[in-house]
Image (cartoon, grey):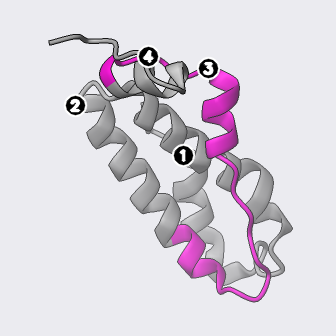
Amino acid sequence: MNLIKIARSEKAAVRKYVDVPRSSAELSRQASVIVEPTIPIRLYFRSADLLIKQARVYKLEHDLEHAYVLYMKYTMLGLNELPKHPSYKDPENKKSLKLLNKCYCF
């Protein structure tokens, strides 16, 4: 069986049969996050928790590309996007912010 199939789109054929690593720029594009001010911030805290848990699973499975993307999403969410949310500094979010900023993820 040929590992690399010659096709119209050689790049797609190579990616289909050989595990070609993606560039960090491509992975970073996949890690973009946008926070909507109308969505309750507690949902973003829950999403951050799920992102970090899934990233750990990928890391343990040695799926480093997916782990990288999820760690980057977590970082972008916590450092860049959540501070823009109107409820970010509300006192009831203090505990969640502390956990988010602790980042014992690696």
- Residues at circles 2 and 4 in contact by the CB criterion of under 8 Å: no
69 in magenta:
no
- For the residues carrying marks 3 and 4, which lies nearer the camera in this image? 4
Mark 4, Cα crowd under 10 Å, few <14 / some 14-19 / many 20+, is few
Using the numbered discs, state the Cα–Cα distance from disc 2 to disc 3 in whole angstroms. Answer: 20 Å
Please, what secondary structure does the residue beneath circle 4 have?
loop
The structure residue drawn at horizontal position 64% and vertical position 22%, both measured from the top left corner, is: 24
Using the numbered discs, state the Cα–Cα distance from disc 2 to disc 4 in whole angstroms. Answer: 17 Å
Using the numbered discs, state the Cα–Cα distance from disc 4 to disc 1 in whole angstroms. Answer: 34 Å
Using the numbered discs, state the Cα–Cα distance from disc 1 to disc 3 in whole angstroms. Answer: 29 Å
Query: Pointer 1: what residue?
Result: 102
Mark 3, Cα crowd under 10 Å, few <14 / some 14-19 / many 20+, is few
Mark 1, Cα crowd under 10 Å, few <14 / some 14-19 / many 20+, is few
Q: Which residues are magenta?
A: 17-45
Say which label, 2 or 1, has the lower sequence index: 2
Say which label, 2 or 3, has the lower sequence index: 3
